[in-house]
Image (cartoon, rainbow, N blue to C red):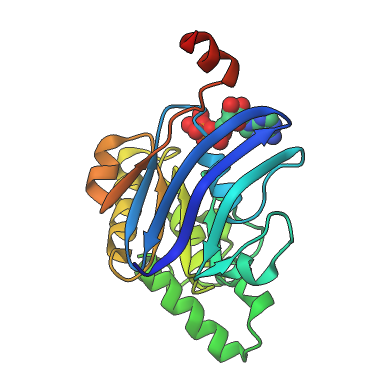
Amino acid sequence: MDHVITVRELRVRDREKPLVGPVSFGLEHGSTTGLCGPSGAGKSTVLRVLVDLLPAGLTRDGELEVLGRPIAAGKGDADLRAKVVLVPQTPVVFGGSILDNALFGVRHVLRASREDLHARAEQALNEAGLWKEVCDRLDSPAQTLSAGQRQRLCLARALALEPAALLLDEPTSALDERSRDTVEESVAALRGRRTVLIVSHDPAQVDRLCDRKVMLEPPVAVERAVAVAT
Ligand SMILES: Nc1ncnc2c1ncn2[C@@H]1O[C@H](COP(=O)(O)OP(=O)(O)OP(=O)(O)O)[C@@H](O)[C@H]1O
């Protein structure tokens, strides 16, 4: 099977203490996968592994491949950063305009004319379902957008990088129901075209948006496992 991301027997530890895993999964091209599990099971940590931004002090074992290429831990792979893009739970909106915000990121990896960058922003904002709402005010401060619009702006910023995989960490947890629906519509529209991994606490949301789900359970401490076995 042709996977954009493959994870095999991934484990994360804090020195000797197991924090996450083992977990194995593959993300097929164009699929939307839900990453689920109880609080503390390690969902956010798995996303950090996938963008190679594990907090200092934590180590990982197991294999990670992106587009068939093995990714070694902690090598600061700039190529990977543009291929696998994480949209955090709380939208990060900078002080500039809506256009500046959409292009933040892609500007650093793509040498292109102003017109081409503008076209890239339009395409990304369209794909994120925000274009119609902002096309006549691209130069307005991004801070003027509503919470749901901000989340879609962050989605557009990530899409402008044309990532091989998009990671969404609880994309609607900070939103009211109406904004949640608009963000969900945008995410649903990516199905089949983009490869998406969504962390969600909401089983109904996973059912609405995802083709499949990966369940993560907190690791069983070795001492406990031995105690139970004896
Ligand atoms: N920097 C760190 N140092 C030590 N332990 C950490 C660190 N970051 C996370 N952990 C631990 O790793 C485990 C997984 O945390 P993580 O935040 O990935 O879980 P989660 O499934 O995303 O939780 P939630 O659903 O509550 O957001 C937890 O036990 C957490 O306390």
Q: Residue at x 56, y 72 (%)?
A: 99
Towards the viewer: 221 or 175? 221
Q: Is residue 179 visible?
A: yes
> Which image quadrant for residue 188?
bottom left
Q: Tell me where residue 186 appears, x and y as whole percent.
A: 33, 60
Would residue 90 be seen by someone viewing this image from the given angle? no
Which residue lies most toward the front here? 230
**Is 72 placed left or right of 27 in the picture?**
right
Lateral position of residue 92 relative to residue 182, left or right: right
Front-most of residues 142 and 198: 198
Residue 133 % position (x, y): 38, 65
The N terminus lies in which quarter of the figure? Answer: bottom left
Instruction: Tell me: residue 25, above or below residue 125.
Output: above
Name the residue rendered at 35%, 52% in the picture. Answer: 33
Estimate the x, y position of residue 124 in percent, counting from the top left: 44, 73
Specify the quarter for ligand 1: top right
- Which of 47/2 is in front? 2
